[in-house]
Image: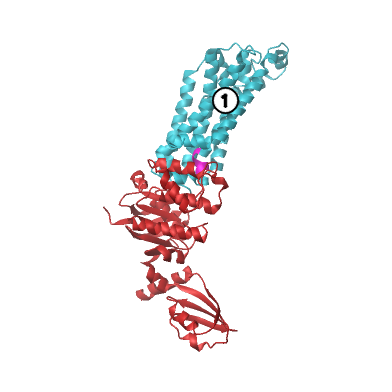
Chain colours: A red, B cyan
Amino acid sequence: MADEAIRASQLTKSYGPVLALDGLDLEVRRGEIFGFLGPNGAGKTTAIRLFLDLLRPDSGRVTVLGLDPRSQGVELRKRIGYLPGDFTVEGHQTSRQLLTYLGNLRGGVPMGRIEALAERLALDLDTKIRNLSKGNRQKVGLIQAFMHEPELLILDEPTSGLDPLMAREFLTLSLEARDAGQTAFMSSHILSEVQQVADRAGIIRRGKLIAVDEVEALRAKSVRRVQVTFAEPIDSSEFAAIDGVSDLTIDDGVLRCRLLGEADPLVKAVARHRVQDFISEEPDLEELFFHYYTEEAGSVS
Amino acid sequence: MFRDVWTKTLWDHRRSLLGWAIGLIGVSLVYGAFYPYMAEPGYADLLDTLPEGLVQAMGWEDFTSAEGYMGAAVFGVLGQVLTVIMAVGLGARMIAGDEETGGLELLIAHPVSRRRAVAQRALSLLLSMVLAGLAVFLAVFTLSNPIDLGIPVGNLAASSAQMALLGLVFGSLAMAVGGIRGRRGLVIGVTAAVAVLAYLADTVAPLVDAIAWIENLSPFDWYDPTAILREGLMVGDALLSLGASAFLIVVAVVAFDRRDIGV
């Protein structure tokens, strides 16, 4: 048995003149949750579609669960649960009918398992799919990916359209799957979402994998914008020297800065004053890319 | 219904299939019901005043006999056009249409080989055309006695079946084009263009000696309703239609197996 759930080497794929994947190297270990991070159009979906043999690479090699997606596709896809990035199905059917059918294509999935998942995600199985909201359709997609307890989950932007509560439930489902020994590969353009569940993450940009790192290390390298509103006048000298703080401005009792890595030193310093508001923005992927780029450039020179 | 790709495909198309069946039955009943008026004298004289070429092209040479009228009206232009449109619409949705909406990607991501998926979709198309043929046959058979048609039941069935086969050829062509390229608009455009050319080859080419042979290549030439209503199933023509359809499905299967999906 191969050690890797997914192993890609030098995968290249172009659509006409557009180079979507430019020599992607990737290893996903068995039993981990792997976050596949990148902005829209970076090549995430192209890579995923290559893993499932929906696309054929121009060059390079990929094995999934030790199998060749092209020649051993049917055997491979039995063991995969896949959520497409754009989950759309015929609307004149209920979720129960669709999920029964998709389960039958896999040799049958117990209805109890489908119902349990639907209950956790708060989905009514007997509503016609065309009458479901975007978020509820996404739940149908998640259930069909999880319902047969596959060895490998390949999920393209799984939380898209889900409200925060359901996104959390999905993350819990993923963690349970990992604890049961399943592997999950999920793409996202939201760093914090990947940070919540993934063990490791790969960062893809313009068809190339820029970095693969433990999620903790990503956190240390991620930059977020912070804005603090104080109830009293404050002095910038107090904050300028704090680890990770840069681009500091203080204007009318409002502190704005960029914060690299752990928030603790800044939070402790801020806590010495009366704080009216504290806004910490989602870490910016572009900043993270920049960090890895400069690191790479530094190590080369 | 939810066990196999082909049953699920038929079930997904249930509304459209029901609509087509009702439409075909309605058109067959209405046109068939006019036969008794055509059999009256006077219409033959009217037809004599029309240009011979037009009469021949439209298949109106023998409008006053039961076989001639039914072959030109119910089983003729209108029935053929409806059957072909139905088949092309279905054939275009089997691969290209379903691919554009994303449904096919989900199916292919399951443990179903692409070849099997297309083959099962082709089976759905075939059964849909059987339904179309059955609808026309039942309508005409029901009318047969009340309008005193006097055409053997077997010949009515044969003509219905061969009209369904005509549809199957173009439905299969739509699947073949879809197998090569998953764009529904492109599939319908190409298939419709081929159907129009094939129709012209069958109706206009025979009028020009130099290109008369082209007629033999047209699927419309493999279906001669008036002759079938007189003499029964044209086995050679039926096999030709079936063979062409089978070939086109093989093209669909092979082409679809080789290309990227959903790009």
Q: Chain of mark 1?
A: B
Q: Residue at x 66, y 18 (%)?
A: B33
Task: Give me the residue at 48% from left, 85% from top.
Answer: A240
Q: Which residues are magenta?
A: B94-98
Which secondary structure lies at badge 1?
helix
> Residue beneath label 1, please?
B202
Report if residue B255 lies within the magenta region.
no
Rendered position, A17 above or below B177: below
Asked if residue A225 is positioned above or below residue B10 in the image, the reply reads below
Q: Dot 1: few (<14), some (14–19), or many (≥20) neighbours within 10 Å?
A: many
Residue drawn at 73 percent across, 12 percent down: B42
The image quadrant of residue A20 is: bottom left
As drawn, is B225 to the left or to the right of A39? right
Q: Nearer the viewer, residue A202 or A206?
A: A202
Q: Nearer the viewer, residue A92 or B137?
A: A92
In magenta stretch: residue B95: yes
* Viewer-proximal residue among B129 and B54: B129
- Dot 1 amino acid type: Asp
- Residue B128 visible from this viewpoint: yes
Say whether residue B221 is visible.
no
Position of residue B213 relative to residue B191, above or below, is: above
Using the rendered view, name the quadrant where residue B156 is placed.
Answer: top right
In the image, residue A32 lies at what x, y percent?
34, 60
